[in-house]
Amino acid sequence: MSLHFTGLVIGIATFLIIGLFHPIVIKGEYYFGVKIWWVFLISGIISGIASLLIEQILLSTLLAVWSASSFWSIGELFEQRRRVERGWFPARPEGKLFEKK
């Protein structure tokens, strides 16, 4: 009996990619607002096209997950703005892009 780890690697990597995008959306909205939505769009398009062009199944799949996460993050960015408006997350003080600590 042989073990095949590709599915497990894809599952773990998918979990990590989604987990990476969560703080990126929160911090991105905090520092730049929703005007960075196009960064996620470009990332999604490039990684989606790359996924179509790469034969290796593991890399192709992970690029597709990255693409889907990028597109999903566009909606989450605007939802994050609503969460900030509701007071669920802190709003960035006006005029301060990065604070020194």
Image (cartoon, grey):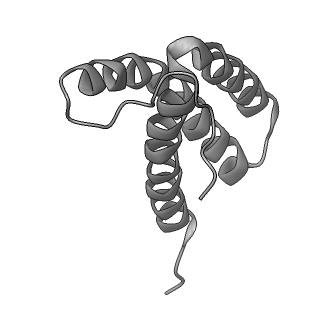
Q: Nearer the viewer, residue 9 or 28?
A: 28
Instruction: Please give left or right for residue 77 compared with residue 5 in the image.
Output: left
Looking at the rendering, in which quadrant would you find the C terminus?
A: bottom right
Residue positioned most to the bottom? 1
Give above or below for 72 relative to 59.
above
Q: Residue at x 69, y 18 (%)?
A: 45
Q: Nearer the viewer, residue 90 or 9?
A: 90
Residue 31: percent from left, percent from top? 56, 31
**Percent position (x, y) of residue 49?**
75, 22
The residue at 27%/18% (across/down) is 82
Which residue: 50% across, 58% down?
16
**Quarter assignment of residue 65:** top right
Q: Indicate the position of residue 72 as horizontal and vertical percent values.
A: 44, 25
Residue 15 percent coordinates (x, y): 43, 56
Q: How many marks?
A: 0
Is 101 positioned to the left or the right of 55 in the image? left
Residue found at x 71% / y 30%? 47
Q: Please, is residue 79 above or below residue 6 in the view? A: above
